[in-house]
């Protein structure tokens, strides 16, 4: 029996219920999590008015289902997201809508179907074991910054499975360091999103944001050109990049162009690296806070033979990773826009209103989850936990626009936790309490610091 954890996992303080627009904008610029009021953890819906637009944050499961699953075409992605991310992601599947988005998904989705996950599994496992080997030099009990470690491992996973190269590759290292710089310069919602305007309107990006985005896209372009040459020569490895570049749209018979592929690789790296690194770092912190659960995951990892078929035996590890994604969803907010008049909970909503779906608040909603701020992986065996998974859990979004790599990410998270915990113990560093903030993903303001020691065999 697992004892209830004593300390609650870190959670940012909420702002007062009423603040001026300018105060909100300053808070928002600093961190979108602490810029929100505490009432959002219990409200079914909240309306936010600015001189520029109306915004509705919805936590009502029925409304969420309507927006994401029942009528998704009526709620396209808001370009207020694109305002912040387009310098890096271009017209990637994360930002597009309508027929462009549908065409992109028809080409991309086959690379992440069930059978292909088995094909990519060796790359995930190899990156995990390489990460375990690198940690040996750090396992001396002194505090280590965990986010840097998990970023390295997650980047290795992406490069091995996407381009069949290890993180030690010179280009891979350049992309990795450029992404680390980029994610600190640009929040997930750009301040220019407050003012909705035409595409030509200046967005006032920081110079570092533009420079790092340009560097990343230049490096990705090189990788993609090299792969296209290998495909033409008939000697390309059978990995995700080759699969996506050679898949034809069933409707048109066309493949992705070079520019389109660069856009998609950028979002694969953001979604597959940034989000995975965030989730893994928070997972290790939560296990350091809860040694009994850590021992259970270590025992499962020591009994796991590294085979794809053996993943089903990692139940506790899977539940820990699920609970980590509940408490610290890597992408904390999803933004849609109304394309026609709507009625939300008896309130008229005009065309062009912003609809915010917040996994951060939904996953901690006091009317949907028992003890929502507590770390309790066993909750998923309870009726409340099962209902939560069904109605109030969307770390990868939901409906037709659910993250195409959701299955990949779940396998990756479970494997990485199992391999790391079977080899090492992770303990809290009392001098460092991480404070969650949202940049591109939910990270810790000053990093996550843990003490690492070797685990007895």
Image (tube, grey):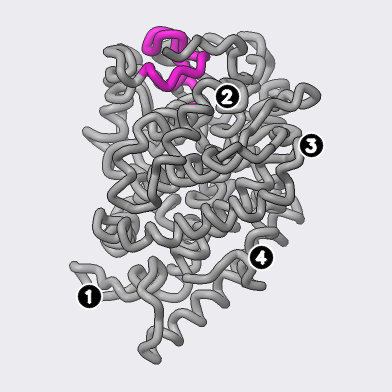
Q: Quadrant location of the C terminus?
A: top right
Left or right, 113 with reference to 79? left
Tell me whether the residue at label 4 lies in contact with that at label 3, contact meaning CB atoms closer than 8 angstroms.
Answer: no
Give the numbered dot on residue 142. 3
| Magenta region includes residue 372 | yes
- Marks 4 and 2, Cα distance to the nearest angstrom? 42 Å
Give the numbered dot on residue 173. 4
Which of the two discs, 4 and 2, sits closer to the camera? 4
Q: Which residues are magenta?
A: 360-379
Left or right, 280 with reference to 318? right
- Marks 3 and 2, Cα distance to the nearest angstrom? 48 Å
Residue under numbered circle 2: 50
Q: Quadrant location of the N terminus?
A: top left
Residue 217 vertical position relative to residue 297 in the rendered view, above or below = below
Counting from the top left corner in percent of width and height, residue 398 is at: 32, 36
Q: First in sequence: mark 4 or mark 2?
A: 2
Residue 201 vertical position relative to residue 24 in the rendered view, above or below = below
Which of the two discs, 3 and 2, sits closer to the camera? 3
Q: First in sequence: mark 2 or mark 1?
A: 2
Which of the two discs, 3 and 1, sits closer to the camera? 3
In front here: 175 or 132?
A: 132
**Looking at the image, which residue is at 69% across and 37% down?**
452
Q: First in sequence: mark 3 or mark 2?
A: 2
Q: First in sequence: mark 3 or mark 1?
A: 3
State the SS at label 3: strand
Q: First in sequence: mark 4 or mark 3?
A: 3
**Looking at the image, which residue is at 43% across and 85% down?**
230
Tell me whether the residue at label 4 lies in contact with that at label 1, contact meaning CB atoms closer than 8 angstroms.
Answer: no
């Amino acid at each position: 029996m697992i004892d209830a954890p004593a300390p609650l996992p870190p959670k940012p303080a909420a702002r007062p219920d009423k603040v001026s627009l300018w105060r909100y904008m300053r808070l928002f610029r600093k961190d979108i999590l602490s810029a929100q009021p505490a009432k959002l953890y219990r409200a079914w819906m909240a309306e936010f008015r600015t001189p520029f637009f109306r915004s509705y944050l919805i936590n009502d499961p029925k409304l969420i289902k309507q927006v994401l699953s029942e009528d998704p075409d009526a709620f396209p992605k808001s370009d207020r997201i694109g305002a912040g991310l387009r310098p890096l992601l271009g017209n990637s599947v994360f930002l597009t809508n309508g027929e462009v988005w549908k065409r992109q998904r028809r080409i991309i989705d086959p690379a992440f179907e069930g059978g292909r996950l088995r094909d990519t599994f060796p790359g995930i496992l190899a990156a995990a074991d390489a990460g375990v080997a690198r940690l040996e030099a750090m396992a001396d009990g002194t505090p280590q910054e965990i986010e840097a470690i998990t970023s390295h491992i997650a980047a290795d996973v992406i490069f091995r499975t996407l381009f069949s190269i290890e993180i030690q590759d010179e280009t891979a290292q350049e992309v990795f360091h450029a992404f680390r710089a980029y994610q600190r310069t640009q929040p997930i919602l750009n301040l220019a999103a407050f003012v909705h305007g035409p595409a030509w309107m200046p967005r006032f990006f920081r110079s570092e944001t533009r420079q790092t985005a340009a560097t990343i896209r230049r490096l990705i372009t090189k990788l993609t050109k090299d792969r296209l040459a290998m495909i033409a020569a008939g000697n390309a490895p059978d990995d995700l990049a080759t699969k996506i570049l050679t898949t034809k749209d069933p409707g048109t018979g066309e493949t992705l162009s070079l520019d389109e592929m660069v856009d998609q690789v950028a979002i694969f790296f953001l979604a597959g690296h940034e989000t995975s690194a965030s989730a893994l770092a928070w997972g290790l912190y939560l296990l350091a806070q809860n040694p009994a659960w850590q021992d259970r995951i270590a025992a499962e990892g020591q009994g796991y033979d590294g085979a794809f078929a053996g993943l089903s035996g990692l139940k506790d590890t899977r539940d820990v990773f699920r609970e980590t994604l509940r408490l610290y969803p890597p992408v904390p907010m999803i933004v849609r826009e109304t394309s026609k008049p709507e009625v939300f909970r008896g309130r008229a909503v005009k065309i062009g209103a912003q609809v915010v779906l917040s996994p951060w608040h939904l996953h901690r909603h006091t009317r949907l989850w028992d003890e929502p701020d507590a770390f309790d992986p066993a909750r998923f065996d309870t009726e409340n936990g099962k209902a939560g998974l069904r109605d109030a859990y969307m770390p990868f979004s939901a409906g037709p626009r659910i993250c195409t790599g959701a299955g990949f990410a779940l396998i990756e998270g479970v494997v990485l936790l199992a391999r790391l915990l079977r080899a090492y113990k992770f303990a809290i560093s009392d001098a460092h309490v991480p404070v969650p903030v949202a940049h591109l993903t939910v990270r810790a303001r000053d990093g996550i610091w843990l003490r690492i020691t070797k685990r007895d065999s």
